[in-house]
Amino acid sequence: MIGKLNHVAIATTDLEKAALVYRQTLGAKVSAPVDQPEHGVTTIFVELPGSKVELLSPLGANSPLANFLARNPGGGVHHLCFEVQDIHAARDRLLGEGARVLGEVKTGAHGKPVLFLHPKDFGGVLIELEQA
Ligand code: CO
């Protein structure tokens, strides 16, 4: 069911520092920061051949990153995002498999429908599905 690894997301309290590591130390192409108030994050994308790294820092008081960064003050891998052809078919299949789906399908940071899956069902890693 899942296709390409769309991105790996890394949460950090210091977006500029994280971007500098990818731009300067690792020599990657790095986007400007973009505030995404509807998601409670600021994002920077690291462009890689065929995939991306998404650097995330909290934006506003109710950021979904707040708990993660409280547990991981130095930052860390926050989620993996896999592409699927049909997000609603994917959700129905996952519910049928007994997986915990977090909330409803909504529009993600790339303007496409996304869905999040509970880390406890996936080896401790939060999973995002994005309709390709
Ligand atoms: Co993501």
Image: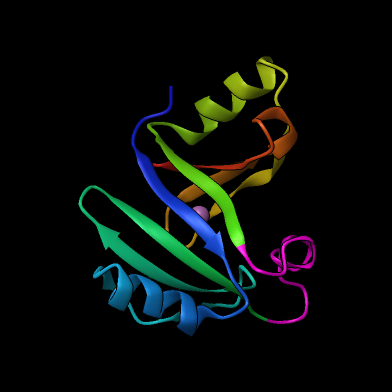
Please, what is the dominant secondary structure of the magenta stretch?
loop
Residue 107 located left or right of residue 65: left
Q: Residue furthest top?
A: 97
* Above/below status of 52 relative to 73: above
Q: Does the magenta run of residues contain 64?
A: yes
Range covered by the magenta-colored residues: 60-75
User: Which quadrant does the N terminus fall into?
Assistant: top left
Residue 29 % position (x, y): 24, 70
Residue drawn at the location 29% of the way across and 67% of the way down: 26
Residue 21 % position (x, y): 39, 74
* Above/below status of 17 relative to 52: below
User: Which quadrant does the C terminus fall into?
Assistant: top left
Of the pair 62 and 23, the residue shown nearer to us: 23
Q: Residue furthest front?
A: 25
Q: Residue furthest left?
A: 49
Residue 105 located left or right of residue 70: left
Residue drawn at the location 44% of the way across and 62% of the way down: 54
* Above/below status of 32 relative to 94: below
Quarter of the figure with residue 57: bottom right
Residue 14 located left or right of residue 18: right
Of the pair 66 and 23, the residue shown nearer to us: 23
Q: Does the magenta run of residues contain 67?
A: yes
Residue 90 located left or right of residue 126: left
Of the pair 24 and 62, the residue shown nearer to us: 24
Q: Is residue 110 visible?
A: no
Q: Is residue 127 visible?
A: yes
Quarter of the figure with residue 93: top right
